[in-house]
Image (cartoon, rainbow, N blue to C red):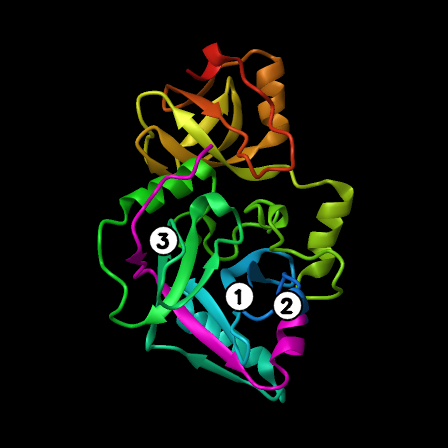
Amino acid sequence: MQGLPFPLHRRPERAVISLTGEDAPAFLQGLITCDVRALGPGQASHAALLQPQGKILFDFFLINEGDRYLIDCSAEQKAELIKRLSFYKLRAKLEVRDVTDRSVGVAFQKPAEGLSFPDPRTSLLGWRVIASQGTLPDVDRSAYRSGRIKLGLADTDEDIGSGKLFPHEANLDQWGGVSFIKGCFIGQEVVSRMQHRGTARSRILPVRIVGGAPPKGSDIRGGESALGTLLSSDGEDALALIRLDRLRDAVEGARSILTEGRPVRVRRPDWARFEVPSQPIEAGG
């Protein structure tokens, strides 16, 4: 699938946190899911801070700015994330700070201003940028959201939430958001077990719904079996948390896959390294 062009604009639902100090790299390396030491200056990764039980508390983008690390996170989660990072800091020589003079934006092409980096999940969603407050335009944001949904990328506030999903379910394992070789981090044992035993049965996936998506939270069923739950949507395109084993059973059993009586076609995104059972065209429209 080709990327969908969208203009440079501010994302007011995002915020910025900074971590500075000599212990910042080691602190983050032992705390969050991505390989912090692999990030050179100007590089970024999707990442998460997990519960000890392995579910995502906060997902965000981590950027190595050279003399500090920046976190591009949900504005709604910012205060709680700062509190949690400060809790784990203990005696580490670092400072966690709310960066109120910067804002987060996105652009389909590399912007001229600010600290910019390619979206680490897929280049089809363009660039992210952290710039001074007041420099990013406030324009129509719908094209970016539409592209995100079509490409199968979950949003913190609309899809992932806090304490609900494992990293595999939100696909962080697919684009380097989880390192399975760097060593320990909070929740690492559970996540590594899911990886090595292949027990990640549910994934957020893009779906196409004939006639338009019903409300978020609607059930998706294959015959009598519950296959998943609808998440964010844009017209006939949507994201859904899908049980792949049950989807396979429904496809092999030639059962209709529906939500609120509307045909659903589950798609395998271009970036996915896992198999998604292929539905006949007639089953999903």
Residue linked to disc 3: 107
Q: Quick check: 256 left or right of 135?
A: right
Mark 1 neighbour density, 10 Å: few (under 14) some (14–19) many (20 or more):
many
Quadrant, the C terminus: top left
SS at badge 2: helix
The residue most toward the front is: 112
- Residues at marks 3 and 2, CA–CA distance in whole angstroms: 25 Å
Residue linked to disc 2: 36
**Label located before the other in sequence (3 or 1):** 1
**Label located before the other in sequence (3 or 2):** 2
Residue 64, position in %: x, y?
55, 71
Residue 231, position in %: x, y?
41, 40
- Residues at marks 3 and 1, CA–CA distance in whole angstroms: 18 Å
Residue at 46% x, 46% y is: 154
Residue range corresponding to the magenta coloring? 1-29
Q: Quick check: 191 left or right of 131?
A: right
Labels 3 and 1 touching (C-beta < 8 A):
no
> What amino acid does circle 2 point to?
Val
Residue linked to disc 1: 62
Labels 1 and 2 touching (C-beta < 8 A):
yes
Residue at 37% x, 59% y is: 111
Residue at 64% x, 30% y is: 275
Residue 122, position in %: x, y?
52, 46
* Residue 22 image-quadrant placement: bottom right
SS at badge 1: strand
Total marks in image: 3
